[in-house]
Amino acid sequence: MLILGIDTSCDDTGVGLVRLEGGRPEILSNLIWTQEVHSRYGGVMPELASREHVERIDGVVSGALAAAGVTLSQVDVLAATHGPGLIGALLVGLMYAKGAAQALDRPFYAVHHLEGHIYAAASEAELEPPYLALVVSGGHTHLFDVPRAGEYRLVGATRDDAAGEAFDKVARLAGLGFPGGPAIAEAARRGNPNAVAFSEPLQGQKGFEFSFSGLKTAALLASKAGATPEDLAASFQAVAVRSLLKTSVRAARHLGRDTLVVSGGVAANAALREAFATSGLRTYFPPPGLNTDNGAMIALAGAAAVLAGRPASPLSIGATAYLPL
Ligand code: KG4
Ligand code: ZN
């Protein structure tokens, strides 16, 4: 069975193809068109994102099919993100997949973007619940308990900025470019993580929440006080990673979980991966290319829905900007 997955929730046009055979999904291709137009604004411009998706989607689908050596008519199941995300951007991939499903008379599965991120890490490892899942991206910092397949209980989330958003904003104020995550990671290698004394957010809390807006303000003050971009990057990255790690480990102990899935764009961060490797938890990350937004993770979530015997989504389903998992 061939499953095509599309994600156009933000500024990446992602299309992936997965083969499901004997209950094991295998990624055949995963093509991502990253929109460059936003870099000159230092953030994603929603209207420009929608337009670029419209212009690119057909080419990215063709490219992903060609890379897997198949044609659209050979696809058995279509899946696309229906939320959360930028509404105009979401609509492009969703309408494309629904249109193809209707034209080919194939089932369509609407996928929650965060479920896609979680399956990006869980599928490769053939990981079965229970586990904790930390989704850290530009739009989310959400910690879920996953007691059973398809069941998500929110344990904690950010009170303000998402972790990736904070990486982006700190990079911008340090003059390191966009997207900020990779720029911070690169500059941090030449900086001193103890140079700027950031205080850890929400220290002493009983719950499992996150907060990053205070760090952003502290970074601005440190920058004005003369901290170098490299020291700022290293110190910010260290405190952000420590905060994510400590809260996740506390939550795991509280809930009696020994397995953790970390996914989303920020999960690509090497310092974060190193730190989580020493957490004492069995930790799983997505393979390369599956951390940031992509279509393969949506196809993997679609494959999980097929395996679980979930009914296909009605073609009347629309895009939703705010969509809790
Ligand atoms: O998952 P994603 O592609 O999009 C959303 O759903 O938000 O995540 C994008 C975010 C951006 O904020 C980007 O700066 C961050 O992930 N990111 C990183 C790294 N690579 C991407 N953050 C830290 N370190 C990285 N290496
Ligand atoms: Zn994402």
Image (tube, grey):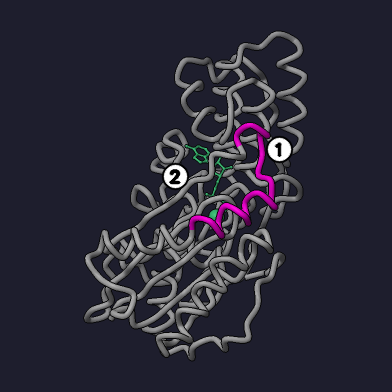
Q: Give the range drawn in magenta.
A: 39-56
> Which residue is nearer to you in this view: 234 or 57?
57
The answer to whether 53 is drawn above or below residue 217 in the figure is below
Q: In this view, does 225 lie to the left or right of 24?
A: right
Q: In which quarter of the image is residue 129?
A: bottom left
Query: Taken as a whole, is the magenta stretch helix, strand or loop?
Result: helix
Q: In this view, does 155 lie to the left or right of 74?
A: right
Residue 284 visible here = no
Residue 253 location (% of width, % of height): 53, 57
Residue 242 visible here = yes
**Going 56% across and 72% down the picture, which residue do you hit?**
94
**Going 40% across and 86% down the picture, which residue do you hit?**
104
Tag of residue 201: 1
Residue 324 location (% of width, % of height): 67, 69
Query: Which residue was labeled with disc 2?
Result: 279
Q: Is residue 282 left or right of residue 164?
A: left
Residue type at numbered disc 1? Pro
**Going 59% across and 39% down the picture, which residue do you hit?**
37
Circle 1 SS class: loop
Label 2, residues with CA under 10 Å away: few <14, some 14-19, many ≥20 = some
Circle 2 SS class: loop
The answer to whether 19 is drawn above or below residue 293 in the figure is below
Name the mark nearer the viewer: 1 or 2.
1
Residue 248 location (% of width, % of height): 55, 51
Name the quadrant where ligand 1 sits: top right
